[in-house]
Amino acid sequence: MSVRIVALGGGHGLYATLSAARRLTPHVTAIVTVADDGGSSGRLRSELDIVPPGDLRMALAALASDSPHGRLWATIIQHRFGGSGALAGHPIGNLMLAGLNEVLADPVAALDELGRILGVKGRVLPMCPMGLSIEADVAGLESDPRVSRAIRGQVAIATTVGKVRRVRLLPGDPPATHQAVDAIMDADLVVLGPGSWFTSVIPHVLVPQLVAALQSTTARRALVLNLVAEPGETSGFSVERHIHVLAQHAPTFTVNDIIVDSSRVPSDRERDQLRRTATMLEARVEFADVCRPGTPLHDPARLAAALEGVLQRRAEGAAEGGSEGGTAPTGTPHAVPTPTVNRPRGDDPWR
């Protein structure tokens, strides 16, 4: 039986992970953030009160069948209307998801139906069955640099000129999509990242049921770090700082492996420092060539090779009688216990 991979994220980062994961198995599930409030997604969620469809559409396109039919439909759903009228800027796939959601009255059913048309063998799921908002504490916008201002909205946070200190979801205790919890519990490998750190990656560990499932699953857990810091959201961030802020937002969250592009951390001294920082997440660090040469993008084939190595370590752990072999039984929705992992924290890395 093929392995089961679950990828969490949003936008172009999730697209890269899905493009890599599907090279290893057809059984790939995407769990997608639902706080986008810009462009077509923002307009549709405002007008129709639906889960923002843009990142979900991109995930479906990434998993579409390689058959001529699947490729055609992938192109169709990504096509944006031109002109200057009411449809201008809307991708066809966003409108299809909006329409299917109205007819079927279920965002998961709408995604499954469009996935069937595209020949998707895996599944695309929203992390939460309703649209959420993100609010951030941002410093550097006032005359006193110690004072933070609350900035609300994914687009506003991603483009702020200040320094993001912390983010939170609104409402503050959102439910997870139960199919997403089941997918995590039944996975062999769960991958978080890469992507916009504060608005696509961290939101997943702010949903209590998701982070509990991530800690309870027998899957191997991997974190893929970004290749570069993003202007605005993570300007000036080191590799270590990405790990620090993730750990600060989710004190109980741990992973088995952190995948870092070799060129991002070239010296032995920097690599030793990163390994020490990775202990905050109880992780080992894997340095691999995962960048597409000459670009700030992950190469799907290279990232797939790195993920294959993670799966191999899982298999070796299972053969040695470790805790990372096998998967939870499928069936009814899983009851996920709340994990209790306590780790010492050093100085606040945001100060």
Image: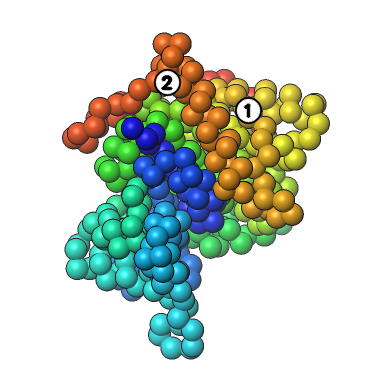
Q: Nearer the viewer, residue 18 or 218?
A: 18
Tell me where residue 331 sits by quadrant: top left
Please, what secondary structure does the residue beneath circle 2 have?
loop
Residue shown at 29% from the left, 46% from the top: 177
Residue 7 appears in the figure: yes
Position of residue 90 in the picture relative to residue 304 (left or right): left
Q: Earlier in the sequence, mark 1 or mark 2?
A: 1
Number of marks in picture? 2
Residue 299 to residue 79: above or below: above
Residue shown at 22% from the left, 36% from the top: 333
Q: Give the percent coordinates (x, y) of residue 190.
A: 44, 35
Q: Residues within 10 Å of mark 1 (few under 14, many from 20)?
A: many
For the N terminus, the quadrant is top left
Kind of residue at badge 2? Glu
Kind of residue at badge 1? Val
* Residue named by callout 2: 324
* Residue named by callout 1: 285
For the C terminus, the quadrant is top right
Q: Give the percent coordinates (x, y) of residue 47.
A: 33, 73
Tell me where residue 280 sits by quadrant: top right
Tell me where residue 156 sits by quadrant: bottom right
Position of residue 138 in the picture relative to residue 127 (left or right): right
Q: Give the percent coordinates (x, y) of residue 228.
A: 69, 48
Q: Nearer the viewer, residue 84 or 241?
A: 84
